[in-house]
Amino acid sequence: MDILSAVHRSDLEWLETHISYHEIDWRKCVHSKSGDTALHVAALTGSTQVTSWLLSHGCDVCIEQQNMDGKRPLHMAVQASTLPIVRILLYYGATIDPLKRADWTPLMLACTKRSLQIVKYLIENGANLRLINKDGWTSFHLACREGDEEIVNYILDIDNSVWNTVSNNGRSPLHTAAMHGHETTVQTLLSRGNYLTDESDACGNTPLLESLRMGHISIARLLISKHQADIYAKDKIGRCGLHIAAEAGQAQIVKTLIETCGVDVNLLSDTGMSALHCAAKEGQTSVVEMLAELGCNIELQDENGRTALWLACGSRKRECAHRLRDLGAKDTADHKGTLPSHLMQI
């Protein structure tokens, strides 16, 4: 459509020459695929002149119109990190906390864009820090996910209890920062919040378990030393950090837990799984090799009689299975009499 193309080009001269706004239904002037109105496009491209012209020539009727993703023009301006457009839209009466399809407010979006100026402006103009999206995340959760220290500290200065929230799956901002590897944010949360040690989410994961899963060794050390996190804390299926790190292929984490923290290389989960079992099931061959070098028992059987070789074969992890055979693993049957070689030729 010529109008949307002109707006996308920020071609104000074309608009002034060709558009008789009294004859246009701006609400129907939308992109066929995205559902963007001219105001959406102008907000995203960042032209203050075109945005102001549209709003003063009848397109203000679209100020709360949603596109196919449920975004309003204010969402688009925040997405583009364009503060002048945000100011203009709010001046013309845009709702400050509209929800897009996934229930994201502009403030939430601003936190993901690391736009401190826009975050400040939205909050100063009444944006609600306590709103949650469909996953139970607040703007503060999202700021911690991004690890922007200026935004994290600014929000804490506005509301010093905002750290005390959890998502629908029970994750706190501390879980989020630890999982995404933001060490400075973790330090801030530990110093400015009052998190319970080893507080777990719906799956039983603590912030320490999240950091171990993702390979963030410095954060793991921080949580252990400053927050007294338990290296033997278990998730809902009875696995400790050693098992989770092995499953995720985090070789350096596994080595540190065994050699530095003193965790037994043959430590079993509640279902009798060793770190070797966990690594073999996921085909983490390098971790399997390292565990063998560190002295693990490759013939350990879980509660169902399954060895690491059995699990590698059952998961069709051919390379890992062959390496286990090279390391001396036997073709041992489980409690039902099923051999690894029954599951996969090795």
Image (tube, rainbow, N blue to C red):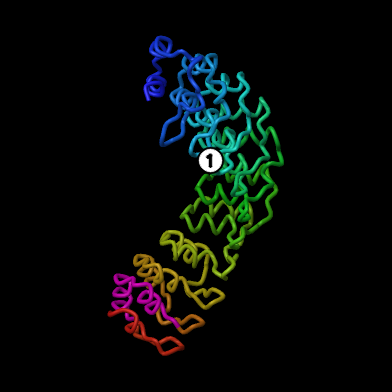
Q: Which residue is mark 1?
A: 147
Quarter of the rendering occupied by the C terminus: bottom left
Q: Amino acid at mark 1?
A: Gly
Most frequent secondary structure within the magenta stretch: helix
Vertical relation: 21 (above or below) 292:
above
Residue 323: quadrant of the picture: bottom left
Tell me residue 29's x, y (percent): 46, 26
Q: Is residue 255 magenta?
A: no
The reply, left or right, for residue 30 in relation to residue 328 is right
Tell me residue 16's x, y (percent): 43, 10
Range of magenta residues? 306-329
Residue 298: quadrant of the picture: bottom left
The reply, left or right, for residue 161 in relation to residue 214 is right
Is 274 in front, or is 265? Answer: 274
At 30% from the left edge and 72% from the top edge, which residue is drawn?
Answer: 318
Vertical relation: 310 (above or below) 46:
below
Is 288 in front, or is 108? Answer: 108
At 53% from the left edge and 54% from the top edge, which residue is drawn?
Answer: 220
Tell me residue 53's x, y (percent): 50, 14
The reply, left or right, for residue 341 in relation to residue 37 is left
At 45% from the left edge and 89% from the top edge, which residue is drawn?
Answer: 336
Q: Is residue 322 magenta?
A: yes
